[in-house]
Image: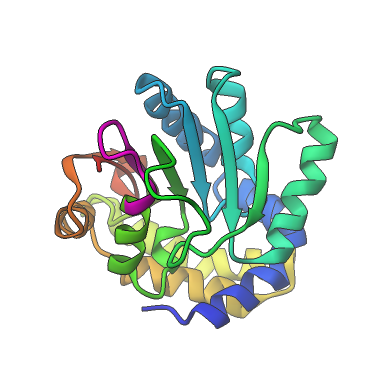
Amino acid sequence: MPNASKVNSMFARIASRYDLANRLLSFGIDQIWRNRLVEEVDYRKPTTVVDLATGSGDVAFALREGLAKSTVIKGLDFCAPMIDEAKKKQVEFQEPEIEFGIGDILDLPLDTGLAQAATISFGYRNLEDRHKGLLEIRRILDPENGHIFILEFSQPHPVYRPFYYFYLKRLLPIVASLITGDLPAYQYLCNSIETFPDREGISSELEQAGFKEIIAIPLALGSVALHIAKA
């Protein structure tokens, strides 16, 4: 499992160029994945949504745009410089309704049963203890109508896999280091993706944490997956 302090330090270093790197390295497809996440959240009509590992806030802003205006949206991240970036964009986008703050998924500063939806996009992989994180997310979800949404890298279709990992291991770190000036951060990214469980593995982790009605939706030829489960 990743070391939390090292992950925090890594994201603090790349915070100011994080968005640019994401757009370029995913060829803009990350916006399509984010839109699919918002559609699935909106389908369940939650009244309170917490975006965990919110980073610079892209998912929180997409949720604000795609959900009913009456929906309460909170964005939490354990890396202060990333929250600083989210708050800068909040001023730029004039979206004062989103509540951004510091929050570690392993010990969330939220009341039990507060949220009807908890989203985590490309942050689940970085948890130091994924089982503990899932239990904590389940704690803050409404036991009657709460859902978790995990958008995360996965293991691609076998035919696509050699090309995917060539890009991931050989090209992506070099391009990312030119954008951010931080080669080790993206070497970590590539290694963490390669060793991460597939859709069945994450579904099993959700089940072990007590989640029900688990759905796993493959995206981008399986290289990304959206897991949805009921608390």
Q: Tell me the quadrant of the picture where the C terminus can be found.
A: top left
Quadrant hosting residue 115: top left
> In the rendering, at what x and y percent does residue 209 appear?
20, 58
Residue at image location 42% in from the left, 43% down from the top: 118
Q: Is residue 170 above or below residue 161?
A: below
> In the rendering, at what x and y percent does residue 122 appear?
46, 54
Is 107 in front, or is 228?
107
Q: Tell me the quadrant of the picture where the N terminus can be found.
A: bottom left
User: Position of 207 compared to 223: left or right?
Assistant: left
Quadrant hosting residue 14: bottom right
* Colour setting: rainbow
Residue at image location 54% in from the left, 25% down from the top: 71
Span colored in magenta: 139-149
User: Position of 76 compared to 151: left or right?
Assistant: right
Residue at image location 42% in from the left, 29% down from the top: 36
Q: Is residue 74 above or below residue 122?
A: above
Q: Is residue 38 above or below residue 81?
A: above
> In the rendering, at what x and y percent does residue 16 appear?
77, 60
Residue 65 shown in magenta: no
Question: How many marks overall?
Answer: 0
Residue at image location 44% in from the left, 68% down from the top: 126
> In the rendering, at what x and y percent does residue 228 appear?
28, 39
* Residue reaching furthest to the front: 111
